Image (cartoon, rainbow, N blue to C red):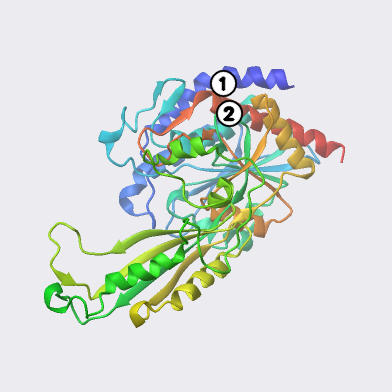
Amino acid sequence: MQSNLTEAVAALMPGLKDDLARLVAIPSVSEWGYPPHTRPAILAAHDAVVDLLRDAGVRDIRDLELPGTAPIITGTIPGPEGSPTVLLYSHYDIVGAGDEAEWTSPPFEATERDGAIFGRGAADTKANVLVHVGALRAWGGRPPVTIKVLIEGQEEVGSPLEEGFPSRHPEHFRADAILIADGGSIRAGQPSLTVSLRGDARITVEVRTLAGGKHSGQYGGAAPDALIVLLRALTTLWDDHGNVAVAGLRREEWPGETYTDEEFRALAEIEPGLSIVGTGGLGSKIWSGPAITVLGIDAPAVDGAPASVQAQARALLNVRVHPEQPAAEAQAAVVAHLAAQRPFGVPLTITAGATGDGFRTSPTGAAGDAMVAAMDAAWSGTTVQTATGGAIPLVKAIADAIPEAAIFVFGATDSFANIHGPDERVLIDEWRRATLAEALFFHEIAERWAVR
């Protein structure tokens, strides 16, 4: 079976590359609220994906319409009696191209070079939509399992499915295994299952000290400067090594695969001569421990700044949370830490914002064994468990609604795919292997289900 599917997927790749070129050419950039100006491209991508799914054997294709969002594609392929049900998830929307001058080739023109296909959305995540399509085609549209499909069109700006929808409507998600094709390998050639996602929380910190800005010559040195107060409070969030210094935030060493320091330096594009901050293992810094980032700060621009003591200042913080710590609990710990600060006797106004819990799983049981076997075979290697510091709240929402389902985050990308940046690309070989892995998974889980 493996050799047959390997040959089938290889034969499908030229057609899949043509399909990806058609999808990349559609600038399906999503915006929250699904405003009218986004709809023509979004609907064009939707229609193209529907056509691809129908051609791959998916039946009963329908749109799940939710207020203020792009249509969500659903469909099924009935499998043999008693076979397991596999839900295939991905999304057809993308982020904007940014400054097109930073791209080597046009962002909405799929360009093949150096074993990769470049273009906005090529990696995140139109190639992963085609992983599902290709795996179904490899089986001639009749895989040995029951298939459910859910492809949405607003993941990039906050999926409407995250807001408790899976718990209210579990029928759309109920399956024995759920393949979240929105990820990939830690490095090219290394089969990787993402088993951990950090949670996150937002916090706004504000300071007001004066009725208005005052001349720095006349008042500086005695009048409390709101910006200095804010900066002084913010610096208490980290110790001298760069570790988060807030009590109550969970951190532990990461037990799975991670980057080497050299890989991380290259990925982060750290300036020469500067060190990676923090102590302990790299995985505990970026995956199984907290991070606090100042996303924005209100301050006068340097150019044209008046000579004034600042009357008010504000900062927006992003807190990344251990995958198994409730995000609201971590947020409360940071809020309590900041509330205890009184720089120069000045209190802070702290507002807790949105939170999203993380996710942690383990590929065990029949489905887990099937997924690892399929990935090992597709990559001719040993599958490792990895993580991401980014949150995908939908994964946690599905896990809460369908706790008996095995959830796997995998896909065609690798860490150097430069998603959301210029020259985004998907390696053709990684894409082929991910497609083969999914096709093999259908066989592996069906075989294990039959002998349970």
Q: How many marks?
A: 2
Give the residue displayed 42% in from the left and 76% down from the top: 341
- Above or below, comparing residue 401 to residue 204 in the picture: above
Residue 37 in view in this figure: yes
Image height check: is 22 above or below 362?
above
Task: Please tell me which residue is depicted at 38% across the width and 36% down the height of the picture.
Answer: 120
Q: Secondary structure at mark 1?
A: helix
* Figure check: 243 above or below 46: below
The label shown at residue 12 is 1
Does residue 142 show up?
Answer: no
Residue 1: x %, y % from top left: 74, 22
Q: Quadrant of the C terminus?
A: top right
In the picture as drawn, the residue positioned furthest to the right comes out as: 451
How far separated are the C-alphas under marks 2 and 1?
A: 7 Å
Q: Position of residue 421 (x, y in %)?
A: 37, 39
Q: Is residue 221 left or right of residue 325?
A: left
Q: Nearer the viewer, residue 269 or 261?
A: 261
Q: For the point 40% across and 65% down, which residue is it?
A: 235
Q: Secondary structure at mark 2?
A: helix
What amino acid does circle 2 point to? Gly
Q: Name the mark on residue 271.
A: none
In the displayed structure image, the side of residue 238 where residue 358 appears, left or right: right
> Marks 2 and 1: CB-CB under 8 Å?
yes
Quadrant of residue 7 in the image?
A: top right
Q: Which residue is identified by label 2?
A: 134
Task: Identify which residue, 412 or 227, lies in the foreground.
Answer: 227
Q: Who's the residue at 31% across and 42% down the image?
A: 98
Query: Residue 30: where, in percent of width, then height?
Result: 39, 48
- At which x and y percent is residue 324? 64, 59
Earlier sequence position, callout 2 versus callout 1 = 1
Q: Sort mark 1 into few (<14), some (14-19) or many (20+) by Cα contacts within 10 Å.
A: some
Mark 1 residue type: Leu
